[in-house]
Image (cartoon, rainbow, N blue to C red):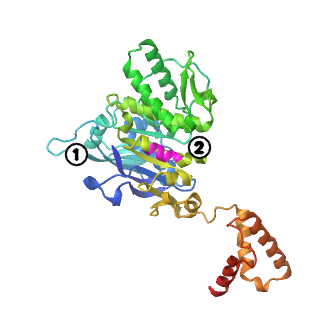
């Protein structure tokens, strides 16, 4: 499965916005997907809302209502219904066949959203916030049976992670059992900030118990091998799983010492929570695949850069794309390093608030080729300067005084010399050439000759 487009109508800060995730804007059978979509924009412009809307549509009607039983505040103008719409593509290996003589692999469907003001949707009037699927919609009815299977087995794969994804901070004895996950749990951290991603820890302990109980359990051994390989590839510095103790604690080998999960840094815990949960859900969804990292599906990640040192931010997108080559990633970030890491063939979208509504613009530049400073000052982020405000004020004032160097008042000349010394010593823009040097003479020549 992959997502061709989403349309948000009268939803929060979106009046009406259709966003395509296909190459050259193609739709239908000719459409080819971007496999990495980066969402940029300032705080409050709708990145999390867009990811949550995708989650609700990919979860299916029943799971969506579990995730958002009362969509309070979702409708921009409560006097009319809001609407969430998506177009999905079925891929080889996805469950189900729609149609007999003419088979369909592209599906369009939508939900209506109501607010506190009574409004009519179809033939019914709704007086409170609600999420409503269109009744009698045959494609949606087929999708809820085949694509949105509630037990995650057979359903088309999709998972989402909110900005507060983390392992539990509670020291606990983990019981070696693992219940099948409901589809709604795939997206729970996007809607419940207090939900911890504990499935990784429970999963490892469960597999360790199975292997200890029956040494010939090759299925458990293979699952653990795949899971450990993914997690260790995403952890820097050669960190790896060392052991599972008798009381159910998972120990990692980090910098030549063993550390339990609860003792790891937030950066390690964030990566382990994401990678561990993702690979566990892939193993659950594709039990017959020898390597589920090759499966297709959709992954939503809000603020991928959170808790990560710039060294990790620079690598994380490439790691994920390399390990899971057939997944379509939707990633929101404030990091130019993550944005560049998406690669040349990524789709980069910037969300902007214009006259009270959100507009989504595609960044045409290949930001993967630039350094962070340039990316921050490009259309992708739109910063006027990457200097601190105080330093930029000094640079601006220095340039202002330099332009009228021959007509400075005594106080201005003293200020100019102080700023010149600052520019020479601090070198905020590469420093100044030595007086009398060739570079200084060239600068003086250009100042006199150029307008």
Q: Which residue is mark 2?
A: 308
Tell me if 54 is positioned left or right of 386 in this view: left
Report the residue at 59% width, 43% height from top: 308
**Which quadrant is the N terminus positioned in?**
top left
Residue 131 in sight here: no
Q: Which residue is mark 1?
A: 104
Q: Quadrant of residue 219?
A: top left
Report the residue at 55% width, 42% height from top: 163
Instruction: Please tell me whether residue 317 belongs to the stretch shown in magenta.
Output: yes
Instruction: Please tell me which residue lies in front, 3 or 447.
Output: 447
Disc 1, disc 2: CB below 8 Å?
no
Instruction: Please tell me whether residue 201 belongs to the stretch shown in magenta.
Output: no
Q: Which mark is residue 258?
A: none
**Which quadrant is the C terminus positioned in?**
bottom right
In this rendering, is residue 449 above or below 269? below
Q: Nearer the viewer, mark 1 or mark 2?
A: 2
Instruction: Please tell me which residue lies in front, 61 or 18.
Output: 18
Tell me if 213 is positioned left or right of 24 in this view: right
The span shown in magenta is: 315-321
Residue 319: x, y in percent? 47, 43
Residue 261: x, y in percent? 59, 28
């Amino acid at each position: 499965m992959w997502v061709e487009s989403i349309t948000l109508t009268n939803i929060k800060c979106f009046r009406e916005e259709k966003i395509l995730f296909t190459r050259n804007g193609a739709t239908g059978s000719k459409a080819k997907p971007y496999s990495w979509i980066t969402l940029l924009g300032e705080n409050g412009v709708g990145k999390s809302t867009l990811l949550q809307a995708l989650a609700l549509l990919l979860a299916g009607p029943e799971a969506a209502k579990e995730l958002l039983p009362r969509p309070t505040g979702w409708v921009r103008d409560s006097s009319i219904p809001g609407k969430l719409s998506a177009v999905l593509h079925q891929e080889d290996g996805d469950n189900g066949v729609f149609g007999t003589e003419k088979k369909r692999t592209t599906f369009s469907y939508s939900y209506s959203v109501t607010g506190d003001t009574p409004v009519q949707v179809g033939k019914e009037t709704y007086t409170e916030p609600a999420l409503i699927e269109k009744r009698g919609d045959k494609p949606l009815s087929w999708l809820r049976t085949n694509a949105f299977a509630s037990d995650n087995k057979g359903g088309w794969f999709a998972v989402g992670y909110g900005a507060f994804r983390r392992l539990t901070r509670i020291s606990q004895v983990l019981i070696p059992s693992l219940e099948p996950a409901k589809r709604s749990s795939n997206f729970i951290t996007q809607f419940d900030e207090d939900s911890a991603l504990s499935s990784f820890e429970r999963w490892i302990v469960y597999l360790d118990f199975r292997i200890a109980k029956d040494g010939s359990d090759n299925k458990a051994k293979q699952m653990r091998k795949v899971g450990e390989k993914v997690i260790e590839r995403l952890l820097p510095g050669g960190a790896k799983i060392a052991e599972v103790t008798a009381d159910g604690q998972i120990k990692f080998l980090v910098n030549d010492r063993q550390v339990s999960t609860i003792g790891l840094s937030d950066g390690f815990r964030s990566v382990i929570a994401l990678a561990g949960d993702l690979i566990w859900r892939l193993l659950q969804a594709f039990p017959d695949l020898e390597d589920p990292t090759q499966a297709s599906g959709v992954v939503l990640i809000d603020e991928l850069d959170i808790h990560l040192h710039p060294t990790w931010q620079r690598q994380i997108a490439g790691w994920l794309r390399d390990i899971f080559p057939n997944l379509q990633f939707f990633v929101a970030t404030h990091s130019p390093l993550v944005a560049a890491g998406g690669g040349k063939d990524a789709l980069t979208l910037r969300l902007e608030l214009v006259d009270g509504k959100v507009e989504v613009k595609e960044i045409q530049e290949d930001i993967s080729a630039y350094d962070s400073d340039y990316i921050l000052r490009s259309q992708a982020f739109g910063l006027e300067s990457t200097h601190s405000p105080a330093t930029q004020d000094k640079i601006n004032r220095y340039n202002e005084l330099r332009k009228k160097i021959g007509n400075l008042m005594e106080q201005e000349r003293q200020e100019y010399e102080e700023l010149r010394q600052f520019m020479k010593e601090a070198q905020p823009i590469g420093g100044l050439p030595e007086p009398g040097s060739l570079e200084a003479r060239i600068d003086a020549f250009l100042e006199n000759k150029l307008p």
